[in-house]
Image: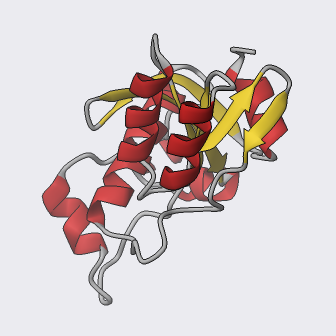
């Protein structure tokens, strides 16, 4: 099984699947929950300026609503080890899984890393639910979510945000 949507269904992850995202130097398929109300309320499109995103973390800040929230990533690669490396790199953000082979070494590595393993039509190793324990949300989380938000707009999944002057 190589269809990311089917893999996500097996894992119980619901949301929009964004295939072939390059995040932090690795290629993964991303599953995000989209808040359509927040998208409609946005005054601007995706914001990728880290300085602006840092100010959104301030308690007194006026920030744009979060449109996407990471649900999970499916590591991709020609070999299960490469896919596992990609999944582990992003496991601090959300749940992670790979499509691999039912070999002892693969099962052990996935189990140790908390990364799910899907082989054929079954989940061999269940992924850790959510992000790595102890990982807290930070500006980098929002930046990654804004990257995925930008991709959803570019792919036509979401309509571009109308500027305030265009809404009149």
Q: Position of residue 150 (x, y in %)?
A: 42, 34
Q: Which residue does the image show at 30% across and 89% down from the upper left?
A: 60
Instruction: Name the residue at the left extreme.
Output: 51
Between residues 45 and 55, which one lies in front from this camera angle?
Answer: 55
Q: Work out whether 43 lies above or below 163.
A: below
Q: Quadrant of residue 9?
A: top right
State the count of labels. Answer: 0
Q: Position of residue 164 (x, y in %)?
A: 43, 51
Between residues 113 and 97, which one lies in front from this camera angle?
Answer: 113
Q: Which residue does the image show at 39% across and 71% down from the upper left?
A: 137
Q: Quadrant of residue 104?
A: top right
Q: Quadrant of residue 52?
A: bottom left
Q: Which residue does the image show at 35% across and 44% down from the upper left?
A: 89
Q: Is residue 51 left or right of residue 43?
A: left
Q: Position of residue 122 (x, y in %)?
A: 84, 31
Residue 43 in view here: yes
Q: Position of residue 92 (x, y in %)?
A: 41, 58
């Amino acid at each position: 099984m190589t269809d990311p949507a089917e893999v996500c269904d097996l894992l119980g992850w619901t949301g929009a699947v964004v295939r072939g995202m390059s995040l932090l130097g690795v290629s993964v398929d991303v599953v995000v929950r989209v808040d359509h109300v927040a998208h409609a309320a946005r005054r601007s499109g995706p914001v990728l300026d880290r300085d602006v995103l840092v100010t959104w973390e301030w308690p007194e800040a006026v920030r744009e609503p979060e449109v996407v929230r990471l649900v999970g990533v499916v590591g991709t690669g020609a070999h299960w080890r490469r896919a596992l490396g990609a999944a582990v790199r992003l496991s601090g953000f959300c749940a992670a899984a790979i499509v691999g082979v039912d070999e002892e070494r693969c099962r052990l590595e996935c189990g140790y890393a908390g990364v799910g393993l899907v082989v054929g039509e079954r989940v061999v190793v269940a992924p850790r639910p959510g992000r790595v324990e102890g990982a807290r949300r930070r500006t980098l989380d929002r930046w990654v979510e804004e990257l995925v938000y930008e991709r959803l707009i570019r792919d036509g999944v979401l309509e571009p945000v109308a500027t305030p002057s265009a809404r009149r």
